Amino acid sequence: MFGTVTYVRRRMKNQANDIRYPLDEFLGIRKGIRYSSLVLRNVSQLGSMMVYRHVSQAIDCLTSWRMSHQNVQQLVVKTGELIQAKSTHESRYDGIITKKKVPYLYLEGDGVKINGQKKQSLEVHRFQVCEGSQKVGNRSEMIAPHFVSHLNRKKAYKEMMAYLQAYYDLSHTVVISNSDGGSGYEKAVFDELALGCLRHEHFRDRYHVHRKMKERMAFVPQLQHRMIRAIAHYDWQEVQLVLDTSESLIEEKEAEALEHLRLLHHYLQRSWPYLKSLKARGIRDPQACIGTIESTHRKITYRMKRQGRLWTKTGAQAMIRVIDSLRNQEFEGWLNQYEALPDDVVAQEKRWQAMKRWVQKKPHFQAHEGAFKGQMGEGKAKSTPLGQFAKGLNQLIMTPNYL
């Protein structure tokens, strides 16, 4: 990031009249963009961690050139569009010959609400997959993680499906999925993502289960720990006993508490098949990694929530793409790669340019002599209204004085 650089390059044309700029392709300079890939990368990376005004201030302090916060936003949006075009292109997974074979694969999905403009609420739909977890110092990190986020759940689902089919051979893999069971994240959705696997085990996310239980049993906090222990031991009789004990402590006027217990009972009944532990299902993976989707929300929530931040769909989608590409370690590779436009896009661009030139051409002016005399109402009696109108019109039509 050294500031403005001026250079001269040759414009070349082949026998098919295709215009090329070899130096631009070598340097990765895209058409219509006056910033290099390094600027796009650094500005977008800063924009994924702080507000655009702070990015503008950092550039002013640390570089020899200036950039307004509006330009920062435009660059982030442009970068997000480039990444989205690359990540959703049909040829993205071309060249992958050998697929990975792993014993366990951990798949999770969840949604995050953010504030949109005009009092709208946007939801970021997220899927993530990894091969387990490992210790790095005092912390644990996921093995080979991949994150997919989108404002459209179906598109996020399709991208995750394409990734799994391209990179993994699931014929000998046990797929372990985890979700809160909300709309779009049911077991059937993960059954489709795990299509062709050796075995699929679905879990209900413990964080959401515990939160639901604490909300419904807020009037008996002394029994909450006992309920958590009963769920962990997968003991339905103990769960029923805790519910009965809670009901006995409800006073006559607390009808709302009774309704909370009824809803909690139905919720646990629906989720009970998915609350059995890994050990109880015969899965003994020392690198097990389940229930991490909530903690991985932080990269998005820290940047896109609170502090009065309001997002447009375009800006939110661009920021999501930048954050995910940085986490997937694909960001720099995509920006440094010059994308040649597909043939159909080039042909369409040529048609638009030809149409534009044709519209801009000025037609050859031809002087028109006009009509010197006209007749109307021929054969009509002059006493009729049309005849009277034709008579008056003929009196107005005079021979031009320049003849």
Image (spheres, helix red, strand yellow):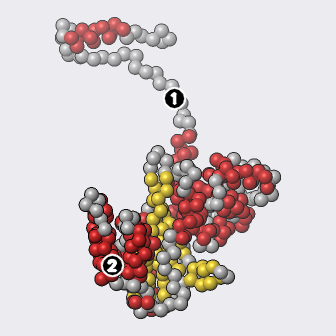
Q: Earlier in the sequence, mark 2 or mark 1?
A: 2
Q: Position of residue 289 (x, y in %)?
A: 51, 82
Q: Are marks 2 and 1 in contact (CB under 8 Å)?
A: no
Q: Which tag is nearer the camera, tag 2 or tag 1?
A: 2
SS for callout 1: loop
Residue name at image x 59 percent, y 55 percent: 77
State left or right for residue 309 relative to residue 44.
left
Q: Nearer the viewer, residue 70 or 176?
A: 176
Q: Nearer the viewer, residue 260 or 76?
A: 260
Residue name at image x 57 percent, y 79 percent: 142
Quarter of the rendering occupied by the N terminus: bottom right
Residue name at image x 62 percent, y 56 percent: 76
Kindly indicate the quadrant of the structure image that contains residue 152.
bottom left
SS for callout 2: helix
Q: Position of residue 277 (x, y in %)?
A: 42, 85
Q: How many marks?
A: 2
State left or right for residue 97 relative to residue 276.
right
Tell me the residue that label 1 is attached to. 366
- Could you say which disc has been placed on residue 18 in the image? none
Tell me the residue that label 2 is attached to. 239
- Please tell me whether residue 98 is drawn above or below residue 351 in the rendered image: below
How far separated are the C-alphas under marks 2 and 1? 93 Å
Q: Nearer the viewer, residue 228 or 51?
A: 228
- Please tell me whether residue 377 is drawn above or below residue 307 in the rendered image: above
Can you see residue 141? yes
Q: Position of residue 163 (x, y in %)?
A: 49, 76
Kind of residue at disc 2: Val
